[in-house]
């Protein structure tokens, strides 16, 4: 297996087929990526505010990497072997952002520390267990480039708690070479990213990436802890929920043994809708089904 490492100064704020790759490698490959947090380290203490940020450069991802043997129509299979976030890191809230934005009167920055076991210290002397995750992971869209702050069918800023250590992410390759980037690590985040940000950390990820040519998808999917989920983005949360269900049904039909209606009954009876994030330019939702229930319906092996 080929190996490659990217450093935290090899960054992009656009996921775009026209952006020159910082590296090339043939798949399968082990890819190690240093990342920098969404704020580019601009928030170091609780008196630092959003005024310190350059919005044209926030939410950078490391990359892009060109995979020399990846072709449009392929599927990237990305196994997340390791996520290591660097303590401390910042989380923020500000007026008119997040689910409770109408009740937020002023911007607040919090700096959090954690130990080697990912126990995060919060005010009052409490420690809460965190599960680090990857916020941005994506390939270049076939059309216009998309900023790393946004999610879409190409992946991007999906901000789903399912993309954690042990997960396998499936991305539909839209252009030859894939043009892959990842970053925006969170030491902690709840489903929805509802208070406006995760615990936005710099760090390092280790991925194993390969190609599949027997799977049909047109949006990202993720497999973790015995479950399989569609990851759908749309301008509205309702639209993202509908798209997540539509694409899971489509996955079963395209890769399996059931028609639209039977696949619909299966998802309605045995799958769960959920919200990944509601704070990005597009909202991201998922529909999740257990592998035990899904695998017998398919013509391919997950």
Image: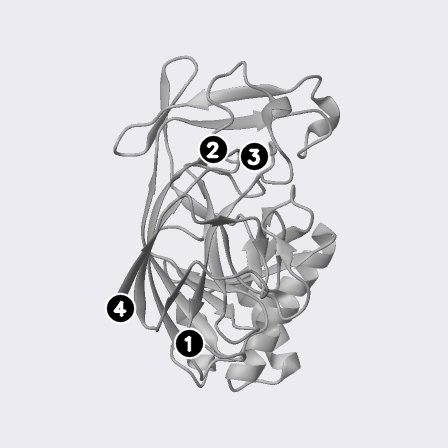
Q: Is residue 269 visible?
A: yes
**Crowding near pointer 4: few (<14 within 10 Å), some, many (20+)?**
few
Q: Which quadrant of the rendered structure holds the C terminus?
A: bottom left
**Separation of disc 1 and disc 2 at Cα?**
35 Å
- Residue placed at 62% from the left, 25% from the top? 50
Of residues 212 and 142, the one drawn nearer to the viewer in this rendering: 142
Res. 273 in view: no
Q: Tags 3 and 1 in contact by the CB under 8 Å rule?
A: no
Label 4 or label 2, whichever comes before in sequence order? 4
Mark 3 and mark 1 lie on one chain; the one further toward the N terminus is: 3
Which residue: 44% across, 53% down?
A: 163
**For mark 2, what is the residue?**
199
Does the CB distance between marks 1 and 4 fall below 8 Å? no
Question: Residue at label 1?
Answer: 295
Label placed on residue 31: none
Instruction: State the CA–CA distance, disc 3 to disc 1.
Output: 35 Å
Q: Where residue 300 appears, x then y in whole percent?
A: 42, 83
Q: Which sits earlier in the primary sequence, circle 1 or circle 4?
A: 4
Instruction: Give the spatial CA distance, label 2 vs label 3.
Output: 7 Å
The CA span between labels 1 and 4 is: 30 Å
Earlier residue among tags 1 and 2 = 2
Disc assigned to residue 2: 4
Crowdedness near tag 1: few (<14), some (14–19) or many (≥20) residues, C-alpha within 10 Å: some
Do tag 2 and tag 3 residues touch (Cβ < 8 Å)? yes
Mark 3 vs mark 1, foreground winner is 3
Q: Which mark is residue 197?
A: 3
Is 37 on the left-hand or right-hand side of 268? left
296 vs 244, nearest the viewer? 244
Image quarter in which the N terminus is found: bottom left
Q: Nearer the viewer, mark 1 or mark 2?
A: 2
């Amino acid at each position: 297996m080929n190996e490659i490492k990217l450093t935290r100064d090899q960054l992009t704020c656009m996921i775009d087929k026209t952006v020159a790759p910082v590296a090339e490698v043939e798949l399968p490959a082990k890819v190690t990526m240093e990342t920098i947090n969404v704020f580019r380290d601009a928030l170091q203490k609780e008196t630092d505010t959003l005024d310190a940020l350059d919005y044209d450069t926030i939410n950078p991802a490391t990359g892009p990497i060109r995979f020399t043997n990846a072709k449009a129509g392929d599927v990237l299979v990305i196994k997340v072997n390791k996520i290591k976030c660097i303590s401390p890191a910042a989380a923020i809230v500000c007026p008119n952002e997040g689910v409770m934005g109408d009740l937020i009167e002023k911007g607040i920055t919090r700096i959090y520390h954690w130990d080697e076991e990912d126990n995060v210290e919060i005010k009052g002397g409490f420690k809460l267990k965190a599960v680090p995750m990857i916020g941005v992971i994506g390939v270049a869209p076939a059309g216009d480039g998309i900023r790393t702050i946004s999610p879409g069918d190409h992946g991007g800023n999906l901000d789903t708690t399912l993309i954690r250590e042990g997960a396998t992410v499936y991305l539909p390759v839209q252009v030859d070479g894939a043009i892959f980037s990842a970053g925006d690590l969170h030491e902690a985040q709840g489903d929805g990213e509802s208070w406006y940000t995760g615990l936005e950390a710099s760090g390092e990820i280790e991925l194993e990436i390969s190609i599949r040519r027997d799977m049909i998808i047109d949006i990202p999917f993720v497999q973790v802890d015995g479950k399989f989920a569609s990851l759908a983005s749309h301008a509205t949360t309702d639209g993202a929920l509908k798209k997540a269900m539509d694409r899971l049904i489509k996955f079963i039909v395209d890769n399996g043994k059931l028609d639209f209606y039977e696949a619909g009954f299966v998802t309605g009876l045995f799958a769960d809708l959920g919200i990944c994030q509601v704070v990005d330019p597009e909202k991201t939702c998922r529909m999740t089904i257990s592998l035990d229930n899904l695998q017998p319906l398919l013509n391919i092996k997950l």
